[in-house]
Image: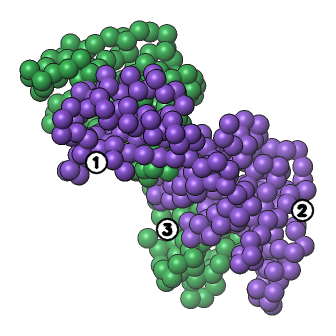
Chain colours: A green, B purple
Amino acid sequence: MSRTAAALVIGNELLSGKIREANLYELAQMLRSLGIRLERALMILDDLEIIAREVRALSESYDFVFTSGGIGPTHDDMTIDAVAHAFGVGVSTNPEMEAMLREHHGERLKEGHLRVARVPTGATQIKADKIKWPVTVFNNVWILPGVPQIFKIKLEIIRERLGVDRPFVSRAVFSNLDEGTLKPMLDEVVAEYPAVDVGSYPTWEDLGYKTKLTFDGKDADAVEIAVQTFVAKLPEGEPLRIE
Amino acid sequence: MSRTAAALVIGNELLSGKIREANLYELAQMLRSLGIRLERALMILDDLEIIAREVRALSESYDFVFTSGGIGPTHDDMTIDAVAHAFGVGVSTNPEMEAMLREHHGERLKEGHLRVARVPTGATQIKADKIKWPVTVFNNVWILPGVPQIFKIKLEIIRERLGVDRPFVSRAVFSNLDEGTLKPMLDEVVAEYPAVDVGSYPTWEDLGYKTKLTFDGKDADAVEIAVQTFVAKLPEGEPLRIE
């Protein structure tokens, strides 16, 4: 069985269409490369009760939960309080993070600046070699920032800490046939190889093919046999290529 | 009260990081322009039971639900069956859609092609003037395609049908101060104008400002007063600009 994960993306600005969400794709790719299966992603508003309820529910259902957003110092940053609320703990100021903030801001330090050193009481701070500011983790909930440039840097900490288990193997077959024509051939392969995740993606742009078929799984031999079984069913001149 | 909406984005290829999700942002912007509040977006795997459960739950909690993906003819396209399952109805072939498919494919028509004319029994088909292929709607669930080029076209049908109620008014104030410094001034405005949604977004790129403050609401006067109240609290030389 794969380790599983869920993502909780927090922010009014995303649901109101002011900002295009950018972190999920990076997270999805990184988890994939570690052999971790991202099974659900949820985008919600800045609302403490809702964040807390979803954190709790996802935490119980998946091996890992990754939150994105809501960890700045202002009134609309609620993720730290919500995670604390979800697990029935308080919020404390982390001394090491506080020291870093005091050093950074010097005599211009305001009370507001120290708010980003707040963590759910009992949380762990995880650092990577080259990344000074830690990621706060409570139980299986990794609390990540929403700003895409910073989010991407933090993914390195996750990669270092979680490591790779058995990775996914992915193959793709490109065809000039449409999905309606391919369907019976696909159905046979899907029925025969339940351990292989078969996807079918039509294109509406001129990419030189009509349909991309994907074959994914953790059993490399099963994936390869499923690909070859499918390809053998195709008519002459097909497939266009296999990747 | 605003009309509310939720989005349900379906597809293994999105959660596995193979494809970057592209429809949510378009949907969010369009709903915003209609004065409809998108409150939640959920991204899930191709799994009939999960899709059905989420469709049902979202349908009960929001005025509108928009699904994206899973309406092609292949084994991984489950949205039609899932919506039918969610509401305890069967699946039928829509005669008008079937006729269009027969005309389009002619003598090369396969059984697979007709699968995209399947709809939850009792569903409505909604068309726009210039868009021949309809959107299928069951109760308050709008069933949209996953392919971004087609999804975008279908948004026009939604826009025509749902129309604009009272639109949102949005203002933005750009500041060279950081969030920690702005926090006490923001807190006062947030407390004073509960009908105005105030957001604070730091930037980590060199965009010529440090923090963007947003003021949103349906009461244009309240938004304007909140902006002016906030601006009056800023020190000399601030704000950089108001939009």
Q: CA distance from mark 1 to mark 3?
A: 50 Å
Would you place residue B79 above or below residue B38 in this image? below
* Percent of width and height locating residue B143: 72, 57
Q: Amino acid at mark 2?
A: Ser
The answer to whether residue A177 is seen in the rendering is yes
* Relative depth, front residue between B139 and A179: B139
Q: Is residue A75 left or right of residue A12?
A: left
Q: CA distance from mark 3 to mark 2?
A: 33 Å
- Res. B241 mark: 1
Q: Amino acid at mark 3?
A: Ala
Q: Earlier in the sequence, mark 1 or mark 2?
A: 2
Residue at disc 1, secondary structure: strand
Mark sitting on residue A172: 3
Q: Amino acid at mark 1?
A: Arg
- For image coordinates 87% across by 75% down, the residue present is B96
| Residue A187 percent across, percent down from the top left | 71, 64
